[in-house]
Amino acid sequence: MLNTKNMNDIVILDGGMGRELKRSGAPFDHPYWSAQALWQAPESVKLAHCRFIEAGAQIITVNSYACVPFHLGEKLYQSKGCELATLAAKIAGEAAAQYPELNIKVAGSLPPPMGSYRPDLFDASAALTIYTDLLEAQKPYCDLFIVETLASLEEFNVAQTATKATTKPVHYAFSLADSLTEGARLRSGQPVVDAILAVCNDSQATGLAFNCSVPEVMLQALKEAQAIMKQHSRSLTLGVYANNFVPIPTDYSANSQSQPMRELSPAAYLEYVKQWTQAGATLIGGCCGIGPEHIQALSHWKAENKSA
């Protein structure tokens, strides 16, 4: 069990915005996904942020994940993509401002420009423009940035270039292959240790996280991160926010279907969280399918142990 001092270090991130919007009845059609609510039901986005804050989230993430050509289509992205990302950031800021006593932070999201889990679709030149545009669109309204669901070192390298345009804290979150048969690896098949080293060598980086993968694969990656950070005398915030999916196959056809969910209860998710915090993670939340009820379980656990 972590002691009270260590529990004070834990910061709770929110959960999966897209699935929460869909569950609440907000418009959520293929291929727009979570971006659709921004122009059809923006109040639903704000309410979803509020549900996560009231559940205990200390950082909420801007609903800009689907504000990319991959989801919007090239024409809509060119005409409205940055405008929608700015709107998403403003909405998150408005939600946070409703709870001034909680000092809620807003994290800008820099999502996969060419779709989640598909490093084979990555186009570095186009991705740099998209990352840069989305960063600029959100920057005035955010306290920090999270580059999410990175599936390859090539994606990290481009994102790293784009984030030089901000002095705000930047966390890099990598999506892991949903199997440990060959050790912890990125979706690209590249070893996680290479990604960890790359972040450690970036003097601007403030955090390293693992996200949008099944909970079972996170612990090994965290252990490897701790070992490498120690070797390089590098201090980074370590984070985890897993999804509630069944394992994603390597031939997953991005944006063509809803990924099947599993039945991971808040209590079951909390058991994984306990392992991650013991391994050094201090930024904890959830990704797709992890809702306010899961975040509330983490918040209650943190509060109970701080007062123990």
Image: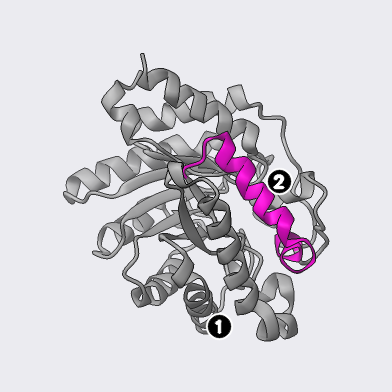
Number of marks drawn: 2
Residue 75 vertical placement versus 304 (above, below)? below
Quadrant housing residue 94? bottom right
- The three-letter amino acid code for the residue at tag 2 is Glu
For the residue pair 96 and 276, the one nearer the viewer reads as: 96
Q: Nearer the viewer, residue 24 or 285?
A: 24
Residue 134 appears at what percent x and percent y? 53, 74
Q: Amino acid at mark 1?
A: Ala
Secondary structure beneath disc 1? helix
As measured in the structure, the alpha-carbon distance from the residue carrying label 2 to the one carrying label 1 is 30 Å
**Residue in the foreground of this view, choosing between 214 and 298:** 298
Query: Who is closer to the viewer here, 308 or 241?
Result: 308
Task: Please state the extent of the stretch shown in magenta in the rendering.
Answer: 33-58
Which residue carries the number 1 mark?
126
* Tag 2 secondary structure: helix
Whole-percent x, y for residue 201 in the image: 25, 62
Q: Is residue 208 above or below residue 67?
A: above
Residue at 74 percent of width and 78 percent of height: 73
What residue is drawn where x is 67% and y is 76%?
A: 69
Whether residue 229 is visible = yes
Q: Residues within 10 Å of mark 2 (few under 14, many from 20)?
A: many
Front of the two marks 2 and 1:
2
**Residue 272 in view here:** no
Assess whether mark 1 and mark 2 are in contact (beta carbons under 8 angstroms).
no
Residue position marked by numbered label 2 in the rendering? 20
Residue 50 is inside the magenta segment? yes
Q: Is residue 30 left or right of residue 8?
A: right
Q: Position of residue 283 (x, y in %)?
A: 41, 42
Q: Main secondary structure of the magenta part?
A: helix
Vertical order, 296 against 119 (above or below): above
Q: Earlier in the sequence, mark 2 or mark 1?
A: 2
What colouring style does the render use? Answer: one colour
